[in-house]
Amino acid sequence: MAMYAALRCVSSNFCTSLPLLTRPSQISSCQYFLRASFHRTLSTTSSLSSALKYTDKHEWVRVEGGIGTVGISSYAQEALGDVVYCGLPEVGQKLEQMEEFGALESVKAASELYSPLTGEVTEINTELAQTPGLVNSACFEGGWLIKMTIDNPGEVDDLMDEDAYGKFVKSLDA
């Protein structure tokens, strides 16, 4: 019977049928298990980071529709500590690959930012002016730094994928 209930829960659209703010005592064990599993799936960043390309300076870029969204890696934000200031370029600034375009300051260090690609800045993350900690709490999502055009698409292929970057980071810790 419990197996039937579990199968029924899985086959239904539990995302919309489970109230997100319900207390555990008010829902069945099957629904509680599924809701807990659902939240763990949302917190995983591997699906987000798998489409990213990385530099050896720890910036990442996600390319969508000819626009690159740039941020710093989880490794970089952990090394920096709590980010308290983000110095970003102006919209319209042209950048060469690996050109310095800004800086991040934390309570324990400062770090320059380098463009992973050649292109023009089309947008900056204005939320970082008020909430620079997004770089730490959501480095692959809300903590992105700039968006830019991509003048030379071939440069993307020269960057590291997630596996290569992981090996690179491990070599730094060795």
Image (tube, rainbow, N blue to C red):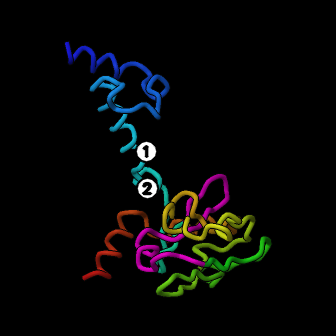
Residue 6 appears at what percent x and percent y?
27, 21
Query: What is the magenta range?
Result: 61-84
Taking the image as shown, residue 32 lies to the left or right of residue 160, namely: left
User: Image point 44% across, 26% down: which residue?
Assistant: 18
Residue 151 appears at what percent x and percent y?
69, 68
Based on the picture, tell me whether residue 6 belongs to the magenta stretch. no
Work out whether 139 lies above or below 39: below
Residue to which mark 1 is pinned: 42
Helix, strand or loop status at disc 2? loop
Disc 2 packing (10 Å; few <14; some 14–19; many ≥20): few
- Checking the image for residue 50, the label placed there is 2
Amino acid found under the numbered disc labelled 2: Ser
**Residue 148 at least partly seen:** no
Helix, strand or loop status at disc 1? helix
Residue 10 appears at what percent x and percent y?
34, 23
User: Image point 57% across, 74% down: which residue?
Assistant: 116
**Residue 139 at least partly seen:** yes
Among the two numbered marks 1 and 2 on one chain, the one whose residue lies closer to the N terminus: 1
Quadrant of residue 68 in the image? bottom right
Disc 1 packing (10 Å; few <14; some 14–19; many ≥20): few
Based on the picture, tell me whether residue 74 belongs to the magenta stretch. yes
Nearer to us in this view, 90 or 36: 36
Nearer to us in this view, 135 or 147: 135
Amino acid found under the numbered disc labelled 1: Leu
Closer to viewer: mark 1 or mark 2: 1
